Amino acid sequence: MAKTRTSPAGRRRHSAGFTLVELLVVLLILGLMTAVAAPHIGGSLPRLETRTAAREVAAVLREARGVAIRDNREVVVLVDLDARRVGVPRGRRPVTLPAGLDLRLLTATVELAGRGSGRIRFYPDGTSSGGRVTLAGPGQVYDIRVDWLTGRVAVDG
């Protein structure tokens, strides 16, 4: 008959650690959780992309207004619908929108620069020609509004 070793207190000693079965169960649970969570994370990326693009377009418009006031000169923001770009000519690098987004522009008739582009103009006193840039992505629409009287840029969406 084999003897069981006991500790000085009279209790059985167990080795520290986990059994292979316990580790496999934990890995199985983690795999199931990942499989359930992955579609939810992947589905939110296009919405995040749309929101980020809207914020970048708003930043370009706000920066243009600030430069117009600071430098006491007109600053024009060109919205190129065909190339999917929004920026200040000869300014910093324009924002190029991802392919999945729909870009629309509402501006004054005199600010239309052809079929596929238009402008929003900011004046030295902070006012603007006004307008609205709309970005539409999967399940989301953002309107970036430029108030003509104050030049204020606001994002709705």
Image (tube, grey):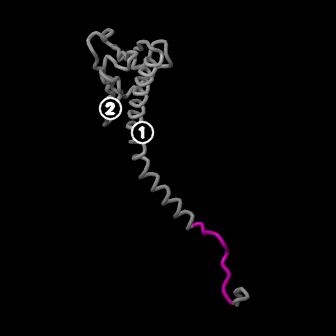
Question: For mark 1, what is the residue?
Answer: 45
**In the foreground, 26 or 154:** 154
**In the foreground, 45 or 119:** 119
Q: Examine the residues drawn in magenta and state their main secondary structure.
A: loop
Residue 97 place in picture, x, y as percent = 41, 25
Residue 9 in the figure: left or right of residue 104: right
Residue 45 place in picture, x, y as percent = 42, 39
* First in sequence: mark 2 vs mark 1: 1
Question: For mark 2, what is the residue?
Answer: 142
The residue drawn where x is 30% and y is 21% is 149
Number of residues whose C-alpha sits closer than 10 Å to that of mark 1, classed few (under 14), some (14–19) or many (20 or more): few
Q: Quadrant of the N terminus?
A: bottom right
Residue 108 vertical placement versus 152 (above, below): above
Residue 25 in the figure: left or right of residue 16: left
Residue 122 vertical placement versus 145 (above, below): above
Calculate the distance from the C-alpha at mark 2 to the C-alpha at mark 1: 16 Å
Magenta range is: 10-20
Number of residues whose C-alpha sits closer than 10 Å to that of mark 2, classed few (under 14), some (14–19) or many (20 or more): many
**In the foreground, 20 or 108:** 108
